[in-house]
Image: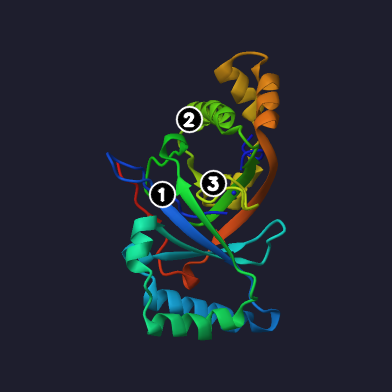
Amino acid sequence: MKKILLTFILIPFILSAQGNQQPPMFMNVMMTPQPDKIDAFEAGLAAHNKKFHTQDNQQVSVYWVTSGKNSGKYVWSLGPTSWAAMEETNNYSEDHTKDWNNNVAANAMPDMQFTYWKNNPLHSNFTRDFELKNLSLFMLDIERFKYQEFLAVLDKVYKVFKTKDPNQQWGVYFNELANTGDGDFVWVDFFDNTSWMDREDKFPEWYEEVHGAGSFAQFLKEFEHSTGWDMQEIWVFRKDLSGSDGKVEVSN
């Protein structure tokens, strides 16, 4: 199931909520450079982020998509943040806006895609500090009026991986603006080396070890009933283009 449940967002989507603290949110902008301006796009993006997006709620990480229909695109990920924080800090200066328009947007295609993803700490597994390198993302659409049914399925999946693969770091995120066609849910695995992708998919076996013999067939029915389309992507962290250093420090 690791390869069945491997996704957009996001992005380092870290830090568990504590007390009344809201779970962190990430604003992702997927961009495509103009084919003849890739070098200028990357240079402008790197300079912009290192000048304006290295601190606090304005920190940005950049990813390069290496699989699927979005291959070759870039994801500009602002966060961790919140709606309130964005309202307070997103009144960009004229200098900021001019730099973005002249050095980033001018070298990109006009069809940028904005999505907003909030972390779900109850189903995520951040147990140690790590550095961003590779992200394996599994995104899906939740069927209309099937949210509670899907959460019940997610509970079972979480229990399997928490029991059988507790050292793996993963984040679960929900789309803050659902029904936009961008997917409702994403499961993100963080891994260092691509050899991780060679691991045997033991999810069906693990599922029945945790939930009982013969239970996997029923799981597939429940999963199909509560979800629509799904897709997978691999993202590579581009530290050279980011304002962040890629270090993820987990709050305990």
Q: Secondary structure at mark 1?
A: loop
Amino acid of disc 3 = Val
Q: First in sequence, mark 1 or 2: give its number.
A: 1
Q: Can you give x and y, in whole percent of width and height, for residue 239 in the image?
A: 47, 67
User: Disc 2 residue type?
Assistant: Lys
Q: Which residue is mark 3?
A: 188
Which residue appears at 66% of the width and 38% of the height?
Answer: 4
Find disc 2 in the rendering and name its residue. Answer: 162
Outermost residue, left side: 19
Q: Is residue 160 left or right of residue 242?
A: right
Residue 179 position in % (x across, y down)? 61, 48
116 or 154: nearer the viewer: 116
> Is the Cβ of the residue at disc 3 closer than 8 Å to that at disc 1?
no
Q: How is the image coloured?
A: rainbow
Query: For numbered disc 2, what is the local secondary structure?
Result: helix
Are there few (<14), some (14-19), or many (20+) residues within 10 Å of tag 2? some
Residue 234 drawn above or below residue 92: above
Task: Verify CB contact (< 8 Å) between mark 1 and mark 2.
Answer: no
Can residue 66 be seen here? The reply is yes
Q: Sequence order check: which comes first, mark 3 or mark 1?
A: 1
Q: What is the secondary structure assignment of the residue under circle 3?
A: strand
Name the mark nearer the viewer: 3 or 2.
Answer: 3
Label annotation for residue 14: 1
Asked whether the viewer can see residue 131, the reply is no
Instruction: Farthest residue to the top: give it.
Output: 213
Q: Residue at x 68, y 44 (%)?
A: 230
